[in-house]
């Protein structure tokens, strides 16, 4: 049985459409292409089974095909019900990658796809949000013994991994790819910053200039969203629980206040915390008529949708990916993409050039775990700096940019305590 026959996808006839998207992305991912030239010859992943749970769109497909070309047997599923693109699934399925994913599956279908992916008995995993790791440890420990380790893509997943590690329950090494410089400095800041507003603007078709944007959370994603909102001409308010990040937001020129106060002023609200209920039932009565609510975190828990539904007297879908909630006093609040991450559920995700760096890092870290899993042990580790640096160097070379090297005398000076 070939990969297309094994796969569960919406429609294999969509494959040509998906291939066009993938070809476009690949043309703008020079670092992955450089790695492909090397790994497709060396085949360092030969004999390995790799299970992937990521946002299933064109850039992710390029990563899956790179790992396939490196010799692995690859199975992939989505990490979010609304970010999966059916044409990409079809194109991957006919290209030798087994796919278990459809756009907007039911919760039971979504979990079934995750379990089917794990039942291929992978040696290595790439996770985004921690669903694969969570199911392995909580529901399918029978599948743990073969797993050498893997990589985690995002903040939410790393929080879950750290919790597993702290309780001494983590059974294999995981690399915290999200915490690498080549990931959070560029993907989280520039990728999220641009793609969130791509998704919001595409979905609402409304002007941002002159309006007030409330950014909930000032981590690297929040920084990017705030920076791009400012560039679009908005007044920006930041809410935070961390005094250091709040100070940074203030120094960056943004207004800082509690969410209960900011709720009175916002035209757009964007959550970027990874935590639950950061916008909740106490805030909706304070919001202005027409306020738009969007989430840029991994799970749809940052905006309390249940409380919004309880307070509303009527709801309707007013545009694709926009649900209108009419409150008792007649005000209308609008939720984008069902509270799921707006840049992928209502857009195409991060730009290809940004994901080129992130996915090159994923591929290199997967190779590192494959080679070093026994000496690492069951813990969460940072990305080795030489891999982080390698990705950045490859990116600079692809842009025709050269930088200086330290002289031997300078290296000696920096390594000495003497002046």
Image (cartoon, rainbow, N blue to C red):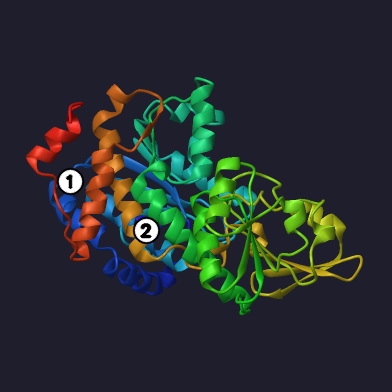
User: Looking at the image, which residue sits at the far top?
Assistant: 168
Q: Is residue 92 visible from the viewing direction of this image?
A: no
At 50% from the left and 41% from the top, the residue drawn is 157
Classify mark 1: residues with Cα within 10 Å, few (<14), some (14-19) or many (20+). some
Q: Of the residues tagged 1 and 2, which is closer to the observer?
A: 2
Nearest the viewer among 344 and 181 is: 181
Q: Mark 2 = which residue?
A: 355
- What SS does tag 2 mark? helix
Examine the rendered structure and indicate whether residue 290 appears above or below residue 31. Answer: below
User: What's the CA distance linking mark 1 and mark 2?
Assistant: 23 Å
Pinpoint residue 71: horizontal percent, then vertical percent.
22, 47
The first of marks 1 and 2 along the sequence is 1
Pinpoint residue 24: horizontal percent, then vertical percent.
32, 72
Q: Quadrant of the C terminus?
A: top left
User: Looking at the image, which residue sits at the far right?
Assistant: 329
From the viewer's perspective, tell me whether residue 320 is left or right of residue 77: right
Q: Mark 1 = which residue?
A: 43
- What SS does tag 1 mark? loop
Nearest the viewer among 2 and 109 is: 109
Q: How many marks?
A: 2
At 29% from the left and 52% from the top, the residue drawn is 360
At 57% from the left and 74% from the top, the residue drawn is 233
Pinpoint residue 33: horizontal percent, then vertical percent.
22, 60
């Amino acid at each position: 049985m070939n990969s297309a026959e094994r796969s569960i996808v919406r429609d294999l006839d969509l494959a040509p459409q998906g291939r066009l998207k993938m070809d476009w992305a690949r043309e703008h991912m020079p670092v992955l292409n450089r790695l492909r030239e090397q790994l497709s010859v060396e085949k360092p992943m030969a004999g390995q089974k790799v299970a992937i749970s990521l946002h299933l769109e064109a850039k992710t497909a390029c990563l899956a095909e790179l790992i396939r070309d490196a010799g692995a047997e690859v199975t992939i599923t989505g990490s979010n019900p609304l970010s999966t693109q059916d044409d990409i699934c079809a194109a991957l399925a006919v290209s030798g990658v087994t796919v278990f994913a459809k756009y907007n599956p039911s919760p039971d279908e979504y979990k079934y796809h995750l379990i089917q992916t794990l039942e291929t008995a992978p040696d290595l995993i790439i996770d985004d949000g921690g669903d694969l790791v969570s199911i392995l440890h909580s529901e399918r420990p029978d599948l743990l013994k073969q797993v050498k380790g893997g990589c985690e893509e995002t903040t939410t997943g790393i929080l879950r991994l750290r919790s597993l590690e702290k309780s001494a329950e983590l059974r294999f090494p995981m690399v915290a790819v999200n915490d690498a410089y080549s990931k959070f400095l560029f993907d989280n800041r520039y990728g999220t910053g641009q793609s969130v507003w791509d998704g919001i603007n595409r979905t609402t078709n409304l002007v941002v200039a002159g309006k007030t944007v409330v950014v909930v959370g000032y981590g690297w994603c929040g920084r990017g969203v705030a920076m791009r909102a400012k560039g679009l001409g908005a007044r920006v308010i930041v809410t935070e629980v961390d005094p250091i990040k709040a100070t940074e937001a203030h120094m960056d020129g943004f207004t800082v206040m509690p969410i209960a106060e900011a709720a009175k002023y916002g035209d757009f609200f964007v959550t970027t915390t990874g935590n639950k209920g950061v916008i909740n039932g106490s805030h909706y009565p304070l919001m202005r008529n027409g306020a738009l609510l969007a989430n840029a975190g991994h799970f749809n828990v940052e905006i309390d949708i249940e409380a919004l539904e309880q307070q509303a007297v009527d709801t309707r879908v007013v545009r694709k990916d926009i649900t209108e909630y009419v409150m008792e006093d007649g005000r209308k609040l609008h939720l984008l993409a069902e509270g799921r991450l707006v840049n992928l559920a209502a857009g195409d995700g991060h730009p290809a050039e940004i994901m080129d760096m992130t996915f090159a890092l994923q591929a290199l870290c997967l190779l590192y775990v494959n080679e070093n899993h026994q000496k690492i042990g069951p813990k969460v580790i940072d990305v080795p700096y030489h891999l982080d640096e390698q990705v950045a160097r490859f990116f600079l070379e692809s842009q025709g940019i050269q930088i200086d090297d330290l002289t031997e005398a300078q290296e000696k000076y920096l390594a000495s305590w003497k002046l």
